[in-house]
Image (cartoon, grey):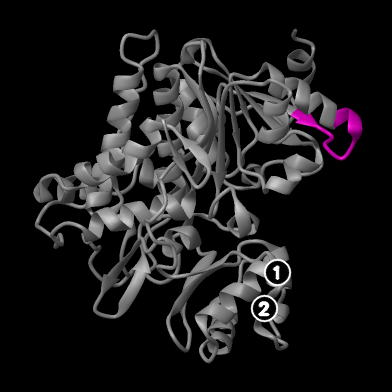
Amino acid sequence: MSTYDGRVQWAGAAQSAERLLEAMGGDATLARRRWAASGAMALTGRPDAAPLAGPARVALAFDQWAEQLAVGTAGTPHVIEVDGAALIGERAALQGLMRRGATSCGGGCRLLHTSDGAVAVTLARDDDVALLDAWLGRASALRGAVPLDDDDWAVIAAAVADRSVDELVQQAILLGLPCAAVGERAADTPMVAAEHMERAVVRPLHESLVIDLSSLWAGPLCANLLGVGGARIVKVESSARPDGARRGSAEFYDLLHAGHESVALDLRTAAGQQQLRELLFRADVVIEASRPRALSAMQASFSAMHAEGWRGQWVSITAHGAHGDAAMRVGFGDDAAAAGGLVAHDDEGAVFCADAIADPATGLLAATVVVGAIAEGVVGHYDVSLAGTAAHLATGVAAHDPIMAGTQAVTPPRARPRRGAAASLGEHTASVMGTR
């Protein structure tokens, strides 16, 4: 173990970026074939033009991470075997999404030109739209609800055209609006930052209890993969503010959560917060994607739990990082990918790289961290950010020869078979909380 920024750095985490860069330098023909066969190429480019092969080396990164999961669970009752690159297109496959150029596949994020660069802004929630006038510094005369139409986005594009990137991003950070400058994040920090690392006797994955406090895609994918490895997954949600993905595609939610137990707690109350702490103390692995102050206010942060003697694998999945000013930033898969510079390019400029690619990349990477740490008998806190992961992938793409489109067939995105329906909100609260 070494130190990084005053924190103890797990050797496995420190080596991950080196392994990634090496893996992405593989055969260009293989990279293009895997990118095309995974469905990711079909999701990259403009709708009225051919799909783009430029970021194809990303497929090799996903495959390498998937191989790590298989190797790390070899010899256990539940080997994790997944098609790594195909994970990129699972949401698109189940929701019928396709490439849309400078508009994200899901439609909620756009790349907008400013006076000195470009930003990616996500407006997928009504709360985000309500912040637009404050962000733009003028009355925007928008309808005020999602989804925004092309006319609404045209108004926004015109309003940001004469503003600077830095001004827009800084104002967005203050407001809690998901916005990032394209390429603002460099791969100059560890891909996985680790702290409070200790050697310990740990349960094997197939005997572990995983408490999943995360939402949307990256964290639930991590939990899903650990569940494939035999772990018991308990998803914990606020009864007042459950995972927003429940309001989206039922098929995608089922894919990530089938077989997991569901606990709903009223985290606005002292009793609910105490129940959460009790659950966390029982966990071998915790996955969370909260702003630090949210868990700290409930005395349920890693620091609080660690001070009380909890030892296990704690994974914080954030948009831009778990420490300092970055920890307060809001971000989603598409804008975070753009922040890391993980976009594709054609003669007209930048377009989105697949569908919210920072989400599946970070979820898959986080799962490899947990599997690797358990195999080595290491416990501690791991910080894996969407923008940071994207930055390392973008560096891997740029570090090797460019990949141009070939003659291979471009396959539509696909998803793994679902294992059943996800549990309803709080379906297992009584049984889980009654277990000792």
144 relative to 18, above or below: below
Marks 2 & 1, CB-CB < 8 Å contact: yes
**Residues packed near mark 1 inside 10 Å, few (<14), some (14 to 19) or many (20 plus):** some
Residue 183 found in image quarter: bottom left
Please state which amino acid type lies under the numbered disc 1: Leu
- Taking depth in this image into account, of 118 and 228 the one nearest to the observer is 118
The stretch drawn in magenta includes residue 271: yes
Classify mark 2: helix, strand or loop: helix
92 relative to 67, above or below: below
- Taking depth in this image into account, of 367 and 167 the one nearest to the observer is 167
Please state which amino acid type lies under the numbered disc 2: Trp
Query: Residue 67: image x %, image y %?
Result: 28, 29
The residue sitting at 71% across, 27% down in the picture is 307
Q: Give the range drawn in magenta.
A: 264-272
Left or right relative to 347: residue 311: right
Mark earlier in primary sequence (2, 1): 2
Of all residues, the one furthest to the right in this rendering is: 270
Query: Residue 209: image x %, image y %?
Result: 59, 17
Query: Residue 268: image x %, image y %?
Result: 87, 40
Of all residues, the one furthest to the bottom in this rendering is: 162
User: On the image, numbered disc 2 is attached to which residue?
Assistant: 135
182 relative to 165, above or below: above
User: On the image, numbered disc 1 is attached to which residue?
Assistant: 175
